[in-house]
């Protein structure tokens, strides 16, 4: 996963030239496409084009940023997940299981 990092410790997947914390130059970097679930919530009201419930998942990437991902699979805190960037969004699935492709294509 590509992103940027600052010497002050701030990191993000958003492309930024200057750090929002300290104002210094950001450096391009790569992180693994894996992380651990910190928190999650199930959406109660679904957008029209989706036919099954979705979770918004906060994932911590090792030595990288925290990322909000979509998932149609129930996850628990500390679950290890793979992060799948697609169409400007991040999706996640357990490292030991598949994600339902039918809904992933719709987002």
Image: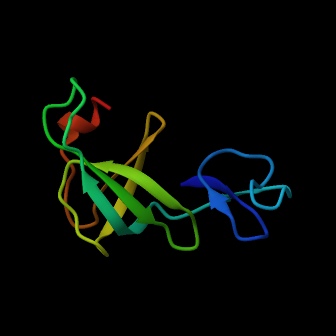
Residue at the outermost front position: 44
Q: How many labels does the image show?
A: 0
- How far across and down, in percent of the image, does residue 4 sit? 69, 55
Instruction: Please tell me which residue is depicted at 77% across the width and 55% down the height of the picture.
Output: 19
Instruction: Please tell me which residue is depicted at 43% across the width and 53% down the height of the picture.
Output: 68
Instruction: Please tell me which residue is depicted at 41% across the width and 63% down the height of the picture.
Output: 59
Instruction: Please tell me which residue is depicted at 79% across the width and 47% down the height of the picture.
Output: 17
In terms of depth relative to the viewer, which is nearer, 43 or 64? 43
Q: Quadrant of the C terminus?
A: top left
- How far across and down, in percent of the image, does residue 74 sit? 17, 59
- Position of 86 compared to 4: left or right? left
Task: Give the image's coloring scheme.
Answer: rainbow
Q: In this view, does 77 lie above or below 25?
A: below
- Position of 17 compared to 78: left or right? right
- Position of 22 compared to 47: left or right? right
Instruction: Please tell me in which quadrant of the rendered image residue 103 appears.
Output: top left
- How far across and down, in percent of the image, does residue 23 sit? 84, 56
In terms of depth relative to the viewer, which is nearer, 24 or 44? 44
Residue at the outermost right position: 24
Q: Is residue 86 above or below residue 42?
A: above
Residue at the outermost top position: 48
């Amino acid at each position: 996963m590509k992103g940027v990092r600052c010497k002050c410790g701030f990191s993000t997947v958003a492309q930024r030239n200057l750090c929002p914390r300290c104002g210094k130059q950001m450096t391009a970097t790569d992180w693994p496409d894996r992380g651990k679930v910190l928190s999650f919530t199930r959406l109660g009201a679904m957008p029209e084009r989706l036919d099954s419930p979705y979770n918004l998942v906060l994932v911590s990437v090792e030595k990288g940023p925290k990322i909000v991902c979509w998932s149609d699979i129930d996850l628990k805190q500390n679950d290890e997940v793979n992060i799948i960037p697609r169409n400007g969004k991040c999706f996640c699935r357990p490292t030991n299981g598949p994600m339902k492709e039918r809904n992933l294509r719709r987002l």
